Structure formats: C-alpha cells, structure tokens
Image (cartoon, helix red, strand yellow):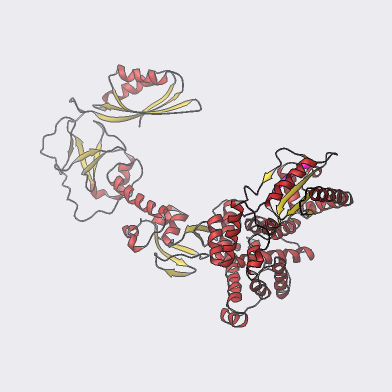
Amino acid sequence: MSSLVNSDFLFGEDPHAQALGVQEILLSLKLDEASCQAAAHLDSELSKEALEKQLGQEVAQLIIGYRGLKAAQVKIARQSSNQLGQSAQAQVEVLRKMLLAFAHDLRVVLLHLASVVQTLRWVTSQRIDTKPSWAQDILDVDAALANRLGIWQLKWEMEDLAFRCLAPDTYKQIAKLLDSKRIEREGFVENIIERLEKELKDAGISAEVQGRPKHIYSIWKKMQGKALDFAQLYDVRAFRILLNDLKDCYAALGIVHHVWQPIPKEFDDYIARPKPNGYQSLHTVVMDADGISFEVQVRTHEMHKQAEYGVAAHWRYKEAGKQGYSGTVSAKAEYDQRIAWARQLIAWKEDAWDQLKGQELDDQIYVLTPLGQVIPLQQGATPIDFAYSVHTDLGHRCRGARVDGAMVPLDTRLKNGQTVEIISVKLGGPSLDWLNIERGYLATHRARSKVKAWFAAQQAEQEGDKEEAPVVEPAKPDLPDIILRKSKAKASHGDVLVVGVDSLMTQLSRCCRPVPPDGIRGFVTRGRGVSIHREDCSTFKQLLARAPERVVLTEWGVPGGSSGKALFPVDIALMAIDRQGLLRDISEVFSRLKINVTGVKTQSRKGLASMQFTIEIPSTDGLQTAITALLDVSGVTEARRK
C-alpha cells in the first residue's frame, strides 16, 4: 500500500525541509517538547546510541520507534492489495490496528500522521501527479486512524488534500460552488453569529460562537452518501458554540431550538453517548424563517480541545501539571470519570497505551506472510499458530519456520511486524508433542482444536466410521500375519466369516452399510477389530491402495443371503417434488412391504424435497422391490440405494 511509505518517497521534497514541516504540524497540535524535537530530526541517519548521546533517551526512542514503524510498513507496501488473501476492508482495518500496535508510545503514531500531512502539503503545493491508489490509501488508513484517535485537525486536512489528489476535478467543482456563494454565505454567517451571541448573553450564558470551517471532502461524502444536491447540505452553513460548563450546553441548545425550528431526526447527543474516540458534542440542524437550514454544534471548551486534538491533547498537559487542567469541570459523573481517565493517561504513557488498547484494540500482534498479508494473532503465538491461521492444511504439514529470513524453533514467540515463512512437507500431520502445554508449541485455541480434530479424525477413519477419505497410518510390524484360508468355524445366520482371523471382532462399516449378498472385504483397524466394507465402497478402495497389507478376505456366513432373524441397515436416498402428504405416502410403502424404518432425514428447498431413509432388511433381495414401489409414489423422481 503506497500511502504507508509516503515519507520514504518525498516526491522531491528536501528531507530536512520535510522534517521541519512535521515539527511545525506538531507545534500546532501543542505536542510536548520531546515530540517536536524528534520531528525536527526525522531525517537523521545517526545510530540509536548516537541519537541518545546527542538528543537524549526519550527523543531517541521516538525517532527509533518511527523508523521501526516505517520499516514494517514498507514490507506491506511492496505488495499490492489484490495479492492479499483478504478483502480490502478487512486488510485496511488490520493495518489501522497495526499502526497502533507497533507504537508502544502513541507519539510515534502522531509523528507518522504529521509526516503524511506534510507530504500531502508538498504534493499539492507543487501540483505533483500521484497514483490514485496512493491518495485512496491515505483516506482508508491514515485519515481513518486520525479519526480513531480523535485528531480532527489532521483528519480534515488529510481528507481534503488526499481527495484533491484523488479527484482533482470534483474537488475544484465543489470549491468553486463554495466560492461562488462566499459573499452571500459570509453575510448569513455574520447574522447568525450576532443573533446567537445576543440570545446567549440575554440568558446570562458566557459563550464563544464560531462559524465552522468547511471541509470539501466531508461535503462530497454527504452528497454521495445521502444523494443530496449541494444546496441541500446542512454543514455548508455550520456554527459552533463553546461554553465553560456542561449545564450551559443543554441550556444553549434550548435557546437554539427556541429561536429556530429544529429539523426532526437531525439531533445527536454525543455528550451523553460519546463516540468511541472520546468525541463529545451536541449536534442539531435548524431552519430559519426563509427555510435555510444550518447545523449548530454545542460543546464545552474542554470538549473542543478533545475534538480538535484527540489523543494529542493529553500530552499538552504533561509539563503544565495541575495548572494544565484549569477550568470548570462538569458535575456529570460520566464526564468526571473521563477527565480523571485522561489525567491518568498523561501521567503514564504506558498506561495510556493500555487504556486505549482496551477501548479500541485487542491484545493481538500483527505479523506478515512472505506476500505481505497481515495476519492477526494473539500475544504469545508461535509459528505453528501462524500456520494454522493461514490455512489448516498448512498447519498440519508445518515442519519448520523462518522469521525475517532466519530459521527459528517452532516454539518461538512471534512479535509485531515480523515476516513468517512456513516450511512444510507435502504429506503428513501434526505431532502429539504440539498438544503438550509444557512444550509451548501452541498458544491459540484455533490451532489446538485443529490438532485435536486431526487425531480424532485419524482414529475414526481407521475404524471405518467416516464417509470421508481417511488418512491411514503406515502398518506396524506387530500386525498379525493374515493367512488366506477358509475358517473352520461354523457361521450362524447373518454372521460374517473373516478368513484366517476367526477371533477378531467384526463390525459393519457405516460408510457403505453392506448387506448380504453384497461382495465384502475386511480392514484390520487398531483396537476395534475388523471393519467390513462393500467391495465397491470408495472408502475401502482408498484403504486398499494405501494399506493393502491390512485388508482381509471376507464372506457372509450364509452364501447368497440370510433366512434368519438378522437385519442390516441400508440407506435409501429419494428426490421428489415437495407436496402435502408426500412423507405419509412414502411411509405407507414401507408399511405395506413390512420394512422397518429406523431413521429419516428430510430437507425441502425451492419446492424440491431431498430425503434419506435408513431401513432394516435381511438381504438385498427385496431392496429393488422397495425402490420400485417408491418410484411409483406421486412426485418421487429418484430413489436409489445410497
């Protein structure tokens, strides 16, 4: 993704000038001295030790953190989005989180965002042509991240400048519409501000009233999202009321609604229900006597600082101490808690990270595939966890791993930004050692459950319980030698004779449900005797191909069928046009033929019924008679032995 490396491709801007531009942006945000000093030296190529000696440990750590963040982003930028095995939206969301996950000090993220803005300023001022994908990535990732952090100053500028690069003609068109109405709009704004100030003063409320700046990208988004004409947009004419006290916010709102007619469904109380990034304000849209609509935002000065600077606002108070919090605090309990929370963030930057992570992120790490796809994993994940996260089969066949090009043990704990390459075999399965908690091979529930499921499937397949293709273990030397000779044991009706292995337990396989006089063969399982299959069973054919030494010759106890009381289960599959009474008519067929039904599965979709009946019969002699009778039922289009 090209935007992620915008500071590495300065479009001809002098690196030192770019660094000074970043510093100017951070100064406008009133960020702390260490951040501003680090910004001015972003172009430095000194080592960490040299930076610490020259600038101090705190500034050096910010610069080194910024370098690490950029290096990780370069890995992603080298691969285009269509090579990633995720949807674009999912990948963008992971990238947003990844930006935060890399920066243990959030000021590193602020340095990154400021560098994006500075590059945009340079590109637009020099009218440099850029790829549309570069500007789109800034909108999707960087501006969205600024929004997450509540830094509206940077968000709005990034959006407008990126939109100007992405769609210059549309940008100019909206700018021209704004400019054509400028004189009229300025006169309207002056009248509304004058009226608001008078009404608030008469009510004894001290307030600052502003005409809100217009942002071209937000205007375009609303025109697109709501299918509105330019003249219908409310926030082209917008105002902001800043107050000292929370109770004055609702009083001011009442005055606004008294003077002008409020528009239904256009009121939002973000004070009672703040946005996830901490934004608080009252939003309303009203209409004057001439039918002109405009938006009014009402908030305290403290809320305005949060709205303009977001997370960046917290470091502003770092050196000011208690004086930095001067001003009246709301009596509302929730608001007091938010201010107390903000103070804790300032005192401990690491606590700030944890608090924000708890609100916006999860305790994940983000590692990369060799193709640049971002894979989220929980803390403590290993290369095996990574392999299972990419694909279950890759996890099963994992035998080694390279992390950032170096071979590592499979119990290595992965870290943010590392590129992981799995070394696998063509065939094979997991090791039982992986389930040993003390060995530490697996940290994720997904990987552990996949390994357990693999071993469970192996046991079931060996026992002939699956309709699915089994994976058979190689034969062990302690298997009994199979002597192909006729057993001397007398067989009872319905029993199975296993040639040469009279004492072994036998069971009919569920995958093909053999019934006399079907041709049958046996497969020696581990622990459950011999599993009996029909000779034409697809599962048996695979068993024969993979482990022929475990196949034994078998035959029914009474050649040609059974005249005793033994019954065998058989599955019959039916397709029919669904209608009322269909199941009743089919049941009557089984009742007339005196066939016992032990299981029924039915599914109806788009007027078609799919049915499966498990019946009990002594032999296949009467099976065709039953199938023929079922085909005579009205609506039945297909009936066959499954």
> Residue drawn 65% across and 49% down?
271
> Percent position (x, y) of residue 279?
65, 53
> Residue 211's x, y, as percent?
80, 53
- Residue 432 in sight in this render: yes
| 484 over 211 or under it: above or below | above
Instruction: Check the picture and name the quadrant holding the N terminus.
Output: bottom right
Quarter of the image where the C terminus is located = top left
Magenta stretch prevailing secondary structure? loop
Q: Toward which corner of the image does residue 499 lie, by quadrant?
A: top left
Q: How many marks?
A: 0
Q: Which residue is at the front of the view, 61 or 350?
A: 350
Left or right placement of residue 605 versus residue 597 in this view:
right
The image quarter containing residue 614 is top left
Provide residue 484's location: percent of width, then percent of height.
17, 44
User: Magenta stretch: residue 541 in it?
Assistant: no
Q: Position of residue 327 (x, y in %)?
A: 68, 60
Residue positioned 47% across, 67% down in the render: 403
| Foreground pick, 90 / 60 | 60
- As drawn, is 381 to the left or to the right of 151? left
Q: Nearer the viewer, residue 511 or 335?
A: 335
19 up-or-down from 390: above or below: below
Magenta span: 270-288
Left or right? Give the position of 458 relative to 565. right
